[in-house]
Amino acid sequence: MEIISVIGAALICTILCVTLKQYKPEYAVIVSIAAAVLLVSGVIGDVSEIIAQIKNILSISSVPTSYIYILLKCLGVCILTQFACEAAKDAGQSSIASKIELAGKIAVISISLPLFGEILSIVAELL
C-alpha cells in the first residue's frame, strides 16, 4: 500500500473516530482498533520485500543469521507492543498501556540475552 493511501485512509478513520466519539464513544474505540488493523494489514505486504533485502544482505556479509533473527524478533515485539499501547491509550487506559510497554521491554531483553552472552564472550577473549 502506498504511503498516500495509508495517510488518506488514516485521516478518514480519524475523522470518523472524532465524529463517533461525540455520540458513541464506545464505537469510536472499536473503529480506531479496526482502522489500525486495516492499515497494518495494508502495509504487511511490504514486510516480505524487507525480509528479502535482509536475506540478500546476509548472503553478502558474514554476520551469523542467529543475530539477524534476534534483531527481527525484537523488532516484531517492539511493533506489536507499540500497536497494543496505542490501542490501550485510545481506549483511555494509560495504566494498561504502561504495563504493556513494560512487558514489551522485558520481552526484548529476554529475546536478546543470548546476544549479550555472545558479546561478553567476545570481550572476554579480547582481554
Image (cartoon, rainbow, N blue to C red):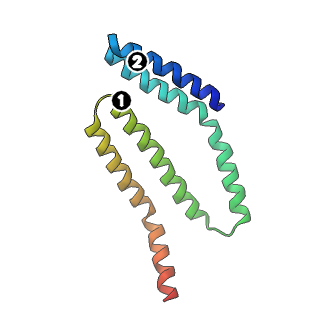
Q: Is residue 101 above or below residue 29?
A: below
Spatial CA distance of label 1 from label 2 is: 11 Å
Report which quarter residue 26 is drawn in.
top left
Residue 55 drawn at (x, y percent): 68, 55
Q: Position of residue 64 (x, y in %)?
A: 61, 67
| Name of the residue lying farthest toward the top | 23
Residue at 37% in and 39% down: 85
For label 2, the SS is helix
Judge left or right: residue 56 versus residue 109.
right
Rendering quarter of residue 69: bottom right
Whether residues under marks 1 and 2 lie with C-beta atoms below 8 angstroms apart, the answer is no
What amino acid type is highlighted by mark number 2? Answer: Val
> Where 52 falls versus 70 (above or below)?
above
- For residue 47, side relative to residue 20 (left or right): right
Residue drawn where x is 70% and y is 51% of the image: 53
Q: Residue at x 45, y 48 (%)?
A: 78
Residue at image mark 1: 90
Compared to residue 73, the image places residue 46 above or below, namely above
Q: Earlier in the sequence, mark 1 or mark 2?
A: 2
Give the class, few, some or many, for how many residues have Cα within 10 Å of label 2's Cα (few <14, many ≥20).
few
Q: Pick out the residue farthest to the left.
A: 95
**Residue ID at (58%, 23%):** 8
Q: Position of residue 41 (x, y in %)?
A: 56, 31
Residue nearest the viewer, comparing 65 with 26: 26
- Quarter that holds the N terminus: top right
Work out whether 67 lies above or below 81: below
Q: Element type at marker 1?
A: helix
Q: Which residue is mark 2?
A: 18
Q: Amino acid at mark 1?
A: Asp
